[in-house]
Amino acid sequence: MRPVEVTDEAIIEAGRALVEQGRNVTGFALRQVIGSGAPNRLKTVWDRHQAQGLPQPEPRPLPDGIVNVLDRLETEYSKQLYKLALEIQALAHQEAEQTLQAGRDQWQHDRQALEQEVEDASQTVETLEQQMQELQEERERLRHELQQQATQIGTLQAQLEHAHQQVQTLTTEMQQEREQRTLAREQVARQEGELVALRKMQAEWAKSNATPSQAVKKRSRASGSASSNDPDR
């Protein structure tokens, strides 16, 4: 994705903020304030703004010494020619010294600006290195968490398999228990049927004046004979 272009207005505002803070306006300093943009372009836009904002220098008047010399030449040209040359040379030397000093001042300013550029660049590199270290630590932390989650998933899968086996075992046991209960209910039903038949026989014998003990004995013999013929007993 193409980076968002920083507007000239944003660059100029950032430069003014640096000037108010008493800092040199460098490309890296502008980038630190804005948060994006190429340092070279940021510095170029600021320098162009500074050049447009400066008033155009007016022509400087001639030094008083040269004006006086010219005045004297009007009346004493022949006599003062040599002296005029010396004065012009002195003034030229003075102008050269001033120009040289201005060049030295500009060189000192550029040097300080360059040193500030280097310092800002070092701070930017240090910040980027710190961010990279933090990203590496975050990646290592996430990798460790993924390993722990993978271990937990394996443990849960083993527990789920064990629980599935337990459910199957309980299902089998419940089926067996249901079958046993069915058999028990059938046996109880048979015994209840025999008891009902026995009570009916006792009632019939009682009506025919037979003793209950004799009826019980006959019923027992009849029940024993039937049990020997019943394959389920």
Image (cartoon, rainbow, N blue to C red):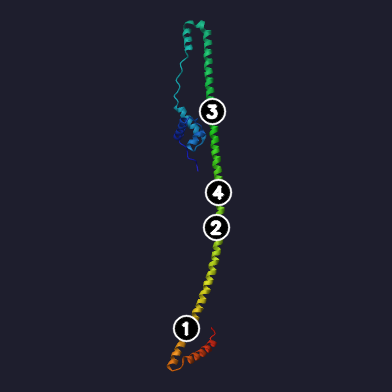
Cα separation, mark 2 vs mark 3, equals 61 Å
Cα separation, mark 3 vs mark 1, equals 116 Å
Foreground: disc 2 or disc 1 = 1
Report x, y in % for residue 175: 52, 73
Report x, y in % for residue 127: 54, 39
Residue 192 is marked as 1
Residue in the picture at 52% in, 76% down? 180
Residue holding disc 4: 141
Cα separation, mark 2 vs mark 1, equals 57 Å
Query: Number of callouts in the render?
Result: 4
Three-letter amino acid code at the position of disc 1: Glu
Marked residue nearer the N-terminal end (2 or 4): 4
In contact (CB < 8 Å): disc 4 and disc 1: no
Cα separation, mark 2 vs mark 4, equals 18 Å
Residue in the picture at 54% in, 42% down? 131
Dot 2 crowding, Cα within 10 Å, few <14, some 14–19, many 20+ = few
Residue 112 is marked as 3
Residue 153 is marked as 2
Residue in the picture at 54% in, 33% down? 119
